[in-house]
């Protein structure tokens, strides 16, 4: 009895198709967000410490109990420290979530660019295979559709030209033209090799 197939689990590295592009953008946006969050956190902390100072000043104005004052001072200090730790923890958590979210979002841009780059490499090596659609959630759908239309038009023209050359060779063979080892025979042999390569490129 065969074991049930485990679902494929993507690793974080699978989302980094273009590390230099994605990480540069992700780190930049995360750093800017961290600075803004730190600035807002500092303002909140300063307001909290000022409020604690006002409370202690008000207490000193109306009461003269040193023991109670020390307890209140300890409590406000503890509250201020807890606020700092809470904001730091929440900030770090938000930065981690933002980092992962940006990696996924940039992957949806880098994925189409990676596929287009791969098709360009195939075209440069003489291959014009079919272009497959993007995933539903990928970005750059319009750009990719235009590229695929261009690629399909080039592939169709390639196919038409190959069929024309193939019919020419068939007509030459039927007419007995180029049979032998003369110059025309060698040219027609080269043309047959070209047709074979173009058919292979369309496969």
Image: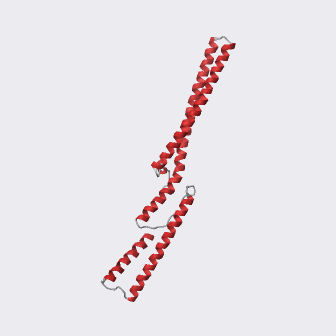
- Specify the color scheme: secondary structure
Residue 123 image position (x, y, % from top left): 44, 65
- Name, please, the residue furthest toward the right: 62
Name the residue located 57 percent from the left edge and 30 percent from the top edge.
Answer: 42
Above/below status of 117 relative to 46 = below
Q: Is residue 183 above or below residue 2?
A: below
| 31 horizontally vs 66: left or right | left
Residue, far bottom: 175
Q: Position of residue 108 (x, y in %)?
A: 53, 53
Q: Is residue 4 visible?
A: no
Q: 23 or 8: nearer the eye? A: 23
Please name the residue shown 37% across and 75% down the image: 193
Name the residue: 47% across, 49% down.
21
Nearest the viewer among 15 and 38 is 38
Q: Position of residue 85 (x, y in %)?
A: 56, 29
Q: Residue furthest front?
A: 183
Quadrant housing residue 174 = bottom left
Relative to residue 104, is residue 2 depicted above or below?
Answer: below
* Rendering quarter of residue 120: bottom left
Question: In the rendered image of this protein, does residue 80 appear above or below residue 100?
Answer: above
Residue 60 seen by the camera? yes
Which quarter of the rendered picture does the C terminus lie within?
A: bottom left
* Residue shown at 50% from the left, 53% from the top: 110
Across and down, in percent, residue 185 comes to 33, 82
**Number of numbered tags placed on the structure image:** 0
């Amino acid at each position: 009895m065969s074991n049930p197939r485990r679902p494929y689990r993507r690793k974080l590295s699978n989302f980094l198709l273009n590390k230099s592009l994605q990480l540069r953008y992700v780190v930049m946006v995360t750093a800017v967000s961290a600075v803004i969050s730190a600035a807002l956190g500092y303002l909140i902390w300063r307001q909290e410490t000022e409020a604690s100072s006002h409370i202690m000043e008000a207490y000193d104005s109306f009461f003269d109990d040193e023991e109670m004052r020390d307890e209140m001072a300890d409590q406000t200090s503890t509250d201020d420290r807890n606020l700092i730790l809470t904001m730091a923890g929440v900030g770090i958590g938000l930065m981690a979530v933002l980092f992962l979210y940006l990696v996924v979002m940039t992957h949806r841009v880098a994925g189409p660019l990676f596929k287009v780059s791969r098709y360009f490499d195939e075209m440069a090596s003489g291959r014009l295979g079919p272009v497959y659609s993007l995933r539903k959630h990928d970005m750059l759908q319009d750009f990719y559709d235009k590229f695929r239309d261009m690629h399909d038009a080039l592939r169709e023209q390639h196919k038409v030209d190959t069929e024309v050359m193939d019919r020419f060779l068939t007509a030459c063979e039927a007419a007995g033209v180029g049979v032998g080892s003369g110059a025309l025979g060698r040219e027609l042999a080269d043309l047959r090799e070209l047709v074979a390569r173009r058919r292979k490129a369309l496969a």
